[in-house]
Amino acid sequence: MLELSEVHSEENKVSSEKDKKRRLKTPAQVMALEKFYNEHRYPTEEMKSQLAEQLGLTEKQISGWFCHRRLKDKRLLRDEACASGRQDRSSGVIQDRGSGLGQDSCGSTKHGDYRNVDPREVESRRLYGNDFPVADLTYKHRSHYTETVSGADNTSSESSSSSQDKFFSQAEDPYDMENPRYLTHNGVIAPVNAKNEKIMGYKPSGYLKVKGEIENAAITAVKKQLGGHYREDGPPLGVDFQQLPPGAFESPIRKPVREPYDDENLAFPNSPDISGVERQPSLSDKYELYNSKLSSQDLYMEEANCSRLHGSYFQDKISQLKQKSTVLNHVKPFPKRNSSLDLYEDSAGESPVYNSKKNQRMSSKHAVEGMRIDSVTNRRGHYDGKIESELHDQANVSPNLIQRSEYFKFKPPNLILNHCELLDTEERGLSTRMTKEEKVNRKWKGIKEHGNQVKLKMHSTNEMTVAKRVRPDIPQQGYVTKASFTEMQTRKFPSKGIEPRPIPTMPLLLEPKPKWHVPECTGI
DNA sequence: TTGTGTTTTATTGCCTCC
DNA sequence: GGAGGCAATAAAACACAA
């Protein structure tokens, strides 16, 4: 096997040298590279050569790829910064400039800021387990997509991470809220303990870098918005509320009673027409509003759950959602539910993968389209019920849904593959995002105005968009691990008759590993 | 099928660091 | 001066709409 792979590698090298036409990296190569990139943005010579050998590429190609990948990350970061800059100007959300990125007129990250710290140093520190203060991590490190990406991306990557998140208007911008997980009661970002960080592979970079910065601003904004209505004796931000007693919502909805809690806590301080006017929505109204928001977004939360399986972008989104919902919990009149953080934890069941090291990348049109959520709800029922059963009825479901169903049929051994798949998807998904984001946003607005069923449909459509981007040559998780690489090669380019290049079999990557861990994108 | 736009890969030149 | 990285650019590959 190894020999064969070596032969392939040689062939690949030779062929790539023979014709100077550029050749696309195979999905396997890209995935491996992406994954490796998530681990090491600046691979050493040794790493490069080993990677080159294992992927059947030249060191030059590897170097070039990493170089371009970094550029891509950077570009995405700029785009994100640009997007957030636009959002910032177009909305009234307060942003703490002091804690944000230095931005130029278009909101892009200034070079000086970006290069403030040698990323290689960051990586080396990361590699050797020196923890950064979160601020450092979020500010200095960019990647993932990851990503993004991707990892899963990853993003994102990716791409994407992905990237990759420009779809979010400011009002919906999930970055607006600080992740309570990392918050102290003062709203200060508390350093994640080293162990967790290591376990989670929490390596904020790229997207996360921006996110961290924006979150700083966001938490400030939230505080400001809460303003005087934020009870000193109330639970601090990020702290779970106690559950209401059972049946608390079973009684008929009453006319609103202007409870002190309501008046004080359910504040719309920034709403111009709120002061002194009986505009307080009724409790039921508020709750309905809240719930409608939840329900209207339930479907999208399914994807959020997927983040557990697919990497950091989703993971990131979940965090953001949690943040949002946590804030909602502070605002909503009925702190019935525990912090949705907890709810969320519950809804998907305990999954250590949540803290998986894979969760670093972000980016994904997929997620962007599916994750425009302001809050979170317990979706377990849904998973176990209709949706899942539908999804599992693969015979009648589109490949997209089948793919989606894989989210729910999560199996740890496939994580890497999922991650890899997502990476690729994310990366690809980014391609038209800039040009299409407005369309998607419009679509989204429409979606929000319809019922859940419509939403489901639309969501599928959205997902279809994403799925279209998924390379057809990447089989679904369930089959991939069983399919030989050759098989997959033959599945590739089914109609175009493009002669598949000999590709080193991925088990190569499982050969004796160097200390820096070669990505295990098995099956592709 | 074709045209167009986007992404990816390769090349080159410049810069910084040692 | 060499090595490594970044940025700009060109061109191929790809995706998608008409």
Image (tube, coloured by chain):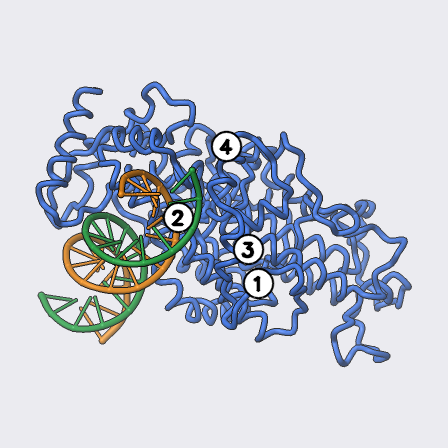
Chain colours: A blue, B green, C orange
Quadrant housing residue A283: bottom right
Q: Secondary structure at mark 3?
A: helix
Q: Give the crowd class for mark 2: few <14, some 14-19, many >=20 residues within 10 Å.
A: many
Real-space Cα distance between discs 4 and 1? 27 Å
Judging depth in this view, the residue of A436 and A74 nearest the camera is: A74
Q: Residue at x 27, y 29 (%)?
A: A54
Quadrant housing residue A210: bottom right
In primary-sequence order, the first of circles 1 and 2 is 1
In primary-sequence order, the first of circles 4 and 3 is 4
Q: Is residue A521 visible?
A: yes
In primary-sequence order, the first of circles 3 and 1 is 1
In primary-sequence order, the first of circles 4 and 1 is 1
**Callout 2: chain:** A
In this picture, is A55 found above or below A343? Answer: above
Quadrant position of the N terminus of chain A in the picture: top left
Is residue A500 found left or right of A363 in the rendered image?
left
In this picture, is A466 found above or below A385? Answer: below
Q: Which of labels 3 and 2 is toward the front? A: 3
Q: Give the crowd class for mark 1: few <14, some 14-19, many >=20 residues within 10 Å.
A: some
Which residue bears the numbered disc 4? A127
- The numbered mark at residue A401 is 2
> Mark 1: which amino acid?
Gly
Q: Secondary structure at mark 2?
A: helix
Give the percent coordinates (x, y) of residue A262.
85, 64
Which residue bears the numbered disc 3? A210
Quadrant position of the C terminus of chain A in the picture: top left
Real-space Cα distance between discs 3 and 1? 11 Å
> Mark 3: which amino acid?
Val
